[in-house]
Image (cartoon, rainbow, N blue to C red):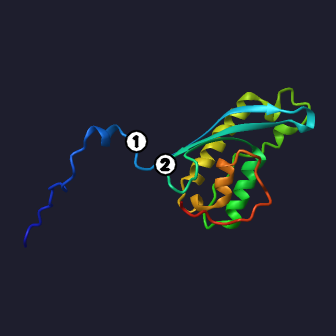
Amino acid sequence: MAETIADTRRLYTKPQNLNDAYGPPSNFLEIDVSNPETVGVGRGRYTTYEVRLKTNLPIFKLKESCVRRRYSDFEWLRAELERESKVVVPPLPGKALFRQLPFRGDDGIFDDSFIEERRQGLEQFLNKVAGHPLAQNERCLHMFLQDESSVDKNYTPSKVRQA
């Protein structure tokens, strides 16, 4: 019976120089959700979040962008992606219906700890969605991340073509 010996030789790799090690990554996509702001009064009160995008992916027309979005805009994006793409869309952080009840003795959905928890959940949601190669082709994602005006909910769904 012949003994087999495992081949432990390494594959030839190109030596890494300083530019390779410390230069910009070949492809990157960074999305931060930050700076929550609560606006309005009474029943017209809501919180908006700053959504910052930095990327060098050719599919995005702007390499850096910053927009403000509210929770309902995130709900719209999720619904559009579920309807138009073949991507399994992750859930959004919860709606917190219990926190919206009156006479709670706290700020409910406008409480700082709740806003921070929701901000983290929205950031995770966006990074998962935008990191998916098929979702990156969806026009609704590009509108959400890069159009400074409010989300056009009457847009025509389509795919984005690389420039």
Residue 21, quarter of picture: top left
Residue 158 at what x, y percent from top left? 67, 66
Residue at the spot 77% in from the left edge and 47% down from the top edge: 150
Task: Answer above or below: position of 129 versus 49.
Answer: below
**Which of the two residues, 120 or 34, is positioned nearer the viewer here?**
34
Task: Answer above or below: position of 109 versus 153.
Answer: above
Residue 44 at what x, y percent from top left? 90, 38
Residue 51, quarter of picture: top right
Task: Answer above or below: position of 63 versus 45.
Answer: below
Determine whether label 1 and label 2 are within 8 Å by CB.
Answer: yes
Residue 139 at what x, y percent from top left? 66, 60
- Amino acid, disc 2: Asn
Residue at the spot 77% in from the left edge and 29% down from the top edge: 111
| First of labels 1, 2 by sequence position | 1
Judge left or right: residue 108 versus residue 117: right
Element marked by disc 1: loop
Q: CA distance from mark 1 to mark 2?
A: 9 Å
Residue at which label 2 appears: 56
Q: Residues within 10 Å of mark 1 (few under 14, many from 20)?
A: few
- Amino acid, disc 1: Pro
Residue at which label 1 appears: 24
